[in-house]
Image (spheres, grey):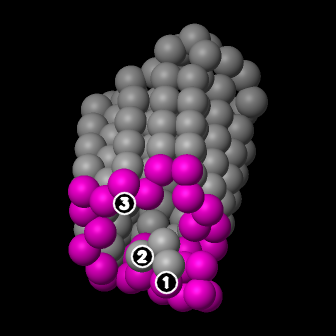
Amino acid sequence: MKTAYIKGRRDFASCDLSLLDLSRTSLAEAIFHQANLAKTNFQNSDLSNANFGRANLKQASLRDAYLAKAYMSYACLEGADLRGADLSEAYLSYANLRGANLCGANLTGARVTDDQLAMAKTNWLTVKPNGKRGLF
């Protein structure tokens, strides 16, 4: 998968990439629409402007990942580890955040509702969509 991206492939829609170790990988602008990414490790990866629409990211590790302007509408992020992730201006409309760990995540300008955030784990280091820190 990494080799395909390096060679110019960006479309991984509907692919089963579950359980892969893609940590510390640059996958900016990749398309993962409806892909199965359950338990995939994206720790410290650049996923800016990536399309995760309707993707399964259940229990995926996105710790310290760069997800600025990522499209994650209708994605399943149930139980995902997003600690320290940069989700600034990410599009999270209708994403399932049940049990997702957003402690220390940056959600500045993200499109996400308070109801969605209430189902996730947050702490005083979490930056809210309005740019302020604090519990939700």
Q: Residue 115: where, in percent of width, then height?
A: 41, 36
Q: Is residue 70 visible?
A: no
User: Is residue 13 within the magenta segment?
Assistant: yes
Earlier sequence position, callout 1 versus callout 3: 1
- The relative height of residue 90 versus residue 81 in the rendered view (above or below) is below
User: Is residue 116 within the magenta segment?
Assistant: no
Q: Which mark is residue 1?
A: 2
C-beta proximity under 8 Å, tags 1 and 3: no
Give the CA distance from mark 1 to mark 2.
5 Å
Residue type for callout 2: Met
For image coordinates 36% across by 60% down, the residue present is 75
Q: Residue 24: where, in percent of width, then height?
A: 55, 50
C-beta proximity under 8 Å, tags 1 and 2: yes
Q: Which of labels 3 and 2 is toward the front? A: 2
Give the CA distance from mark 1 to mark 3.
24 Å
Residue type for callout 3: Ala
Label 2 packing within 10 angstroms: few (<14), some (14-19), many (20+)? few
The boundaries of the magenta stretch are 4-33
Of 56 and 132, nearer the camera is 56
Q: Residue 123: where, in percent of width, then height?
A: 50, 15
Residue ID for mark 3: 75
Question: Toward which corner of the image does residue 107 lie, by quadrant?
Answer: top right
SS of the residue under disc 2: loop
Earlier sequence position, callout 3 versus callout 2: 2
Question: Toward which corner of the image does residue 20 lie, by quadrant?
Answer: bottom left
Residue ID for mark 1: 4
Q: Where is the N terminus found, in terms of image quarters?
A: bottom left
